[in-house]
Amino acid sequence: MSSAKNEAARSLPSVDELLRSSTGCEIIAETGAKHAADLARAAIGAVRKTSSTTSKTETLASCEANLTEIWKLEKMRGQKRVINATGVIVHTNLGRAPLSDAVRNALIEASGACTLEYDLETGKRGKRGRRVEELIVELTGAEDAVVVNNCAAAAFFVLTVFASGGEAIISRGELVEIGGDFRVPDVLTMSGATLREVGTTNRTKIADYEKAIGDKTNLLLRVHPSNYRIIGFTATPSVAELAVLAKKHALIFYEDIGSGALVDLSDYGLTDEPVVGDSIAAGANLVTFSGDKLLGGPQSGIIAGRKELIEKLRKHPLYRALRPDKLTLAALQATLLSYTRGKQFEEIPVMRQLAMTAEEIKRRAEDFVANLPANGAIEINLVADGSVIGGGAAPDVRRPTVVIAIKHKTLSAENVERKFRMFEPPIITRIENQAVLIDLRTVSFDDESVIASAINSLN
Ligand SMILES: *Cc1c(COP(=O)(O)O)cnc(C)c1O
């Protein structure tokens, strides 16, 4: 070590000295002395590598600045509230469905003691999730329903209970990967069922299924391709045709719908999303769908269908491993109650955001921009664009929107995007044509003022 470096090293504060600074005290109060000491050590270590000053006051100041930065970055990690300004309605990386006000209240109520498995009328033990199951029955026309932690678990559960050791017949066009790591064939074969593939990638006929039925066949399986579309020369049997075939051979017909629209959404461009009630009405014996995609509720997997089949699932030992907790059930109940009230397009954020017209968003964007103070550092334009549905649903659908496009006179779009992302609370935007885009479709009215502050801070 050179003697200059030696001198510099001697001027570094000790961990204790650094923690006695106001920043240090603040961090100790929030994270505890032990972890604060680790952070302080890291901050001093970073300054040791770069500093050449021998002034004690200066090194202490740089260590403090470094500690503040390390602490700020640490607080950015883990789960944290953000503002979704991407316009992607069911943003998988940003927590899928944002929940309604009714759900927030229900979560607070359920956080204490609640009637998870208690019947107030009899004062005796009650059935977990029964009210939620009744609401699903009411909304889908199914005979019965049961809820598990997510739709992948629901699919695994159904196959384990009804097809393990036997065969489930599935079209080659449906052996898809649905975002993240959910590969239909992988999860389904974990159940112990053998997938018997029929047809071709683009065309599968009812006769293909019928030819494959044999002694080992337990069920006919249909999986909605969700994030994937085969277009052009295609064919796939209808739900009704498969239901008839299953009945003829005394098999179970199970459909994994995925997104789980409870109401028809074709007015909003979602013409390919099956409605759960339609599938049940067309004769599916079991249907599984997610609670946090188009349904707009908490992460959960819903299984609806024939009474005796659902009863078998509920009594199976695996249910104990897959059943949801009180928070999920409380949130799902509050979400479903918005549907039974017929208020889903007003109360459930996913539904409200889906239904928002480009005109409505344009007016909001115009008001928003008109109220921004003058800022010579940026140029703002309103641009016609499309909002993506997200969550692996309707990959080919864009809802018409109007975005606020921001260009900075000197900073790159990547730089501005990062400033928004590092804002408190973080604002997630997207970049197109060297402009940072803000789509108000997925931004609540309350959060507009936060975005305005972030824009004002650009200079
Ligand atoms: C998304 C999806 C799943 C997985 O649902 P999770 O709730 O994420 O577990 C299963 N099947 C289909 C068809 C899907 O679209």
Image: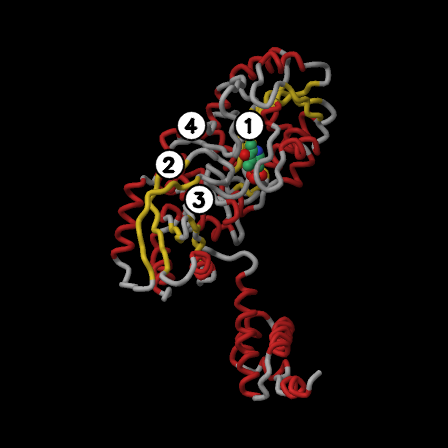
CB of mark 4 within 8 Å of CB of mark 2?
no
Q: Mark 4 vs mark 3: which is more N-terminal?
A: 3
The residue that label 2 is drawn on is: 341
The residue that label 3 is drawn on is: 88
Q: Is residue 226 above or below residue 370?
A: above
The residue that label 1 is drawn on is: 287
Amino acid residing under circle 4: Thr
Amino acid residing under circle 3: Val
CB of mark 1 within 8 Å of CB of mark 4?
no
Gap in Å between the C-alphas at discs 3 and 2?
Answer: 26 Å
Q: Mark 3 vs mark 2: which is more N-terminal?
A: 3
Amino acid residing under circle 1: Val
Q: Which of label 1 and label 2 is nearer to you? A: 1
Gap in Å between the C-alphas at discs 1 and 4?
Answer: 19 Å
Find residue 348 and report its horizontal and vertical position in percent.
40, 42
Find residue 123 and report its horizontal and vertical position in percent.
54, 43
Q: From this viewpoint, is residue 308 visible? A: no
CB of mark 3 within 8 Å of CB of mark 2?
no
The residue that label 4 is drawn on is: 271
Gap in Å between the C-alphas at discs 1 and 2?
Answer: 23 Å
Q: Mark 3 vs mark 1: which is more N-terminal?
A: 3
Find residue 163 and report its horizontal and vertical position in percent.
69, 25
Q: Which of label 4 and label 2 is nearer to you? A: 4
283 or 26: which is nearer to us?
26
Gap in Å between the C-alphas at discs 4 and 2?
Answer: 24 Å
